[in-house]
Amino acid sequence: MTRSRLHAVCAAALVVTLATPISAQAPTRFGLGRAATPDEIARLDIDIMPDGTGLPAGRGTSADGAATYAAKCARCHGPTGKEGPNDVLVGRLPAEGFPFSQDPTLPHTIGNYWPHATTVFDYIRRAMPPTAPGSLTDEEVYGLTAFLLHANAVIPAGAVMDRNTLPAVVMPARRYFTPDTRKQSAGKPRP
Ligand code: HEC
């Protein structure tokens, strides 16, 4: 085949390739993978909404969470949640102000910054301890959530946290956050 004839064939092949819709070329199935089982989906489908939607069964008090905290959290967050070396989890601000824009060095804690108590459960269950995320039982997470809310003086000692009581807890910083009610058009980020 001459060089120019080869080019002509290649050009023709290119035209055919470009003119053929992708869907007509690709097989309907690649034969890879399999459908996820309901159990596999349930293990990943763990997000909890601010209103508590998604919270599992179970319960815990601050006393229940204290031992778990000492065993699995204190080495990074300090014995009372204030000492570090990692994020400070406990602490309120005088007069419940919100002076973070004036002083960005202030530690953001659950008690002075977090708007929703349900996020404490969601975050601990999905992310902590960072060496073994997902390893805590729901009972342990309810206990740890109660322990940290009590340490931040948000709930009294002995308060039981479960799927009904936790969403009803009003966080001290709640009023500093405004829900974003702007409409999101399909496929486009909010303005
Ligand atoms: C090995 C160290 C380590 C251990 C153990 C650990 N944490 Fe953390 N934790 C961190 C680090 C680091 C961050 C910050 C993560 C980030 O910003 O992405 C963090 C963040 C957090 C936060 C969010 C703080 C904020 O205001 O943003 C919470 C709540 C928390 N941890 C709770 C826990 C609990 C409860 C346990 C015990 C089950 C635990 N952590 C165990 C290192 C640790």
Image (spheres, helix red, strand yellow):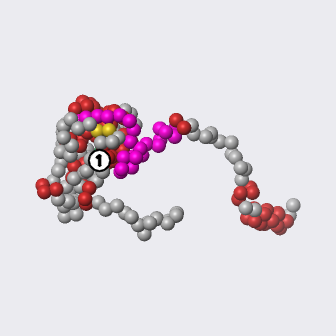
Q: Which stretch is magenta?
A: 40-62
Q: Nearer the viewer, residue 86 or 8?
A: 86
Amino acid on which the number 1 mark rests in the picture: Ala
User: Against 5, is 109 above or below?
Assistant: above
Q: Does residue 150 appear to the left or right of 51 in the view shown? A: left
Residue under numbered circle 1: 168
Residue 52 part of the magenta-drawn span: yes
Seen at 85% across and 65% down, the residue is: 5
Q: Nearer the viewer, residue 190 or 168?
A: 168
Label 1 near ligand 1 (CB < 8 Å)? no
Q: How many marks?
A: 1
* Residue 69 in sight: no
Give the x, y percent position of residue 62. Answer: 23, 35
Q: Does residue 27 appear to the left or right of 181 in the view shown? A: right
10 Å crowding of disc 1: few (<14), some (14-19), many (20+): some
Q: Quadrant of the C terminus?
A: bottom left
SS assignment at label 1: helix
Q: Does residue 3 appear to the left or right of 51 in the view shown? A: right
Rendering quadrant holding ligand 1: top left
